[in-house]
Amino acid sequence: MPINTDIEIHAVNVLVIGSGAAGLRAAIAAAEAGCEVLIVGKRARTDAHTVLAAGGINAVLGTRDPQDTWEQHFADTYKEGYGLGDPAMIEILAREAPEAIRELADWGTPFTRLPDGRLDQRFFGAHTYRRTCFAGDWTGRAVLETLARRSAGIAMRERFYVSGLLHADGECFGAFGFDLDTGTRTAIYADAVVLAAGGHTRLWRRSSSRRDENTGDGMSLALRAGCRLADLELVQFHPTGMVHPEEVAGTLVTEAVRGEGGRLYNALGERFMTAYDPERMELSTRDRVALACYTEITEGRSGPNCGIFLDISHQDKALILERLPRMYRQFLEHQLLDISTTPMEVAPTAHYSMGGVVVDAETTATDLTGLYAAGEVTAGLHGANRLGGNSLTETVVFGRRAGQAAAAWARDRTTISRPSAVVTAVNEALLGLVKRGGEFARPIQRDLRTLMWQRCGVVRDEDGLKQALADIEALTERARDVDVSPTAEGYEDLAHLLDLRAALLVAEATVLGAIARRETRGCHNRSDYPALDETLTRTLEVSSTESGLRLASRAVLKPAPELARLVERTADLESTGRLVE
């Protein structure tokens, strides 16, 4: 089908790229500040990746534990990040979370409440106190639907793919993309842009992300526009994802299963956490449990689908249906398996990107003037291991800040340069991808995900990582010959190629960081460097140059003395019946 050569032009004050919780919250803030806002997303407004967040959202409300403080939330977050988190970002999160969650509740999020009407809170993710609000085991969907209702009056283009940012002389002036159904290309001029396009966990063979999301495309957009990416090697592998059927392999099995008493067994029937953390057992930290599961599998004690077994069948079925309704339905739907009677076979799955675009803590501004970023696409908050429940809080706290900062910049901007040559170049680059070729994007995507799982997965070593670089280079060469032939059914194959090109670039940046981080810290396990190295308490940053990607490092900032003392007093949590990340 011949491609339409016409380009549409659209202009707004603030463009938001990404329709998840961070993007919608940014759009709401910018609209409330009086700006004309446009949201663009690859999916529908109520179907972004946020819907997969199950466990809860954190804020110090003191409902269950009045002694809790924002300072303790800070300490828990900083400590769980192994000293790599940005203290300024963590403090903003801890201070502003209560207002953000109360706001969601006021807007209609159906959080679970106590009989007196206050928001209930539970233990989750290595918190000293109970500070996680929740809506059953579907909190992310509840939050996203609330934000979707609140933003209903804001213009949105669904099924729109952004192929490049428009920028000149160090300033961003919009984005360029196309409609996934019609192929119509649009240059969207904007006084300010907010990037909220998610992480890069779909680069791994087993991932809790759905197909065609979290491919690193947002990170790639920023990197190619001159922004720095940081700590991409810090990827959280959740211990328990589904292993079959193939189309749902990696789909998250929520930590709440272990929180409600779920037990882990290998194929020999051994409750193997006794060998890895006999005190906390299944309630150990997420990185330790993931490593334990991975070890049992690689040493040959796995089940028929190369997983280990998570068993909740000793609990009463009524409790399972009340506390874990989504998990019960999930296994019935995909495996015809009743988890109240039969163990689930599970394995580690790539779950969350701690690294991403470098932003200013206060404003979420990137290195490119006029471009702001929020949510999983950014770096700085989580360090080397994310505190459970903080990701949803991050979306609303920093989404709001990003929208406010973008609106302020848009209002104050007196002149803006929009060189037509930039639009022409981005358009020609996109048109150049529509051609016949001998390769297809999907098989190369699969090969990339497999090599990242094998070479840069739960456990890494120098030889495997260097081989990964060579393999990525070979796949990049294959990607030059991908066939893109639009049809009446749409332009999905063009999107697949763009996803692949982004994934290859971000995979290279990830592996470079993993090679340089010659230590084991949090989620990053190096079998050849099993100890934490204090000299590597540094942020590893990647930038794009004419000669390729360049890696640099910088020292991380330290907390204020009073907060540092609280971090030191915050002991590693023992098994207390709470869910520990």
Image (spheres, helix red, strand yellow):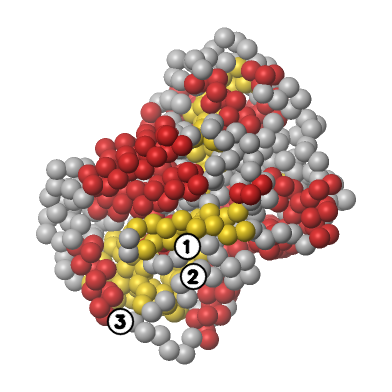
Disc 1 vs disc 2: Cβ atoms closer than 8 Å?
yes
Residue closest to the eye, 310 or 158? 310
Disc 3 vs disc 1: Cβ atoms closer than 8 Å?
no
- Can residue 115 be seen here? The reply is no
Q: Is residue 371 above or below residue 418?
A: above
Q: Mark 1: which secondary structure?
A: loop
Residue identifier under label 3 = 419
Residue identifier under label 2 = 367
> Residue 355 placed where, x, y %?
53, 52
Binning the other alpha carbons within 10 Å of mark 3 as few (below 14), some (14 to 19) or many (20 upward) gives few
Q: Mark 3: which secondary structure?
A: loop
Give the Cα separation between the discs numbered 1 and 2.
Answer: 7 Å
Instruction: Give the amino acid at mark 2.
Output: Asp
Residue closest to the eye, 238 or 140? 238
Residue identifier under label 1 = 228
Task: Tell me the residue at 84%/47% (across/down).
Answer: 569
Mark 1 or mark 2: whose residue is earlier in sequence: 1
Binning the other alpha carbons within 10 Å of mark 2 as few (below 14), some (14 to 19) or many (20 upward) gives some
Task: Tell me the residue at 51%/17% (across/down).
Answer: 299
Instruction: Give the amino acid at mark 1.
Output: Arg
Quarter of the picture containing the N terminus is bottom left
Judged from this view, the residue extending furthest toward the bottom is: 414
Q: Is residue 13 above or below residue 298?
A: below
Give the Cα separation between the discs numbered 2 and 3.
Answer: 20 Å
Task: Tell me the residue at 67%/38% (across/down).
Answer: 581
| Residue mark closest to the camera, 3 vs 1 | 1
Mark 3 or mark 1: whose residue is earlier in sequence: 1
Task: Tell me the residue at 61%/49% (across/down).
Answer: 536
> Residue 356 placed where, x, y %?
50, 55
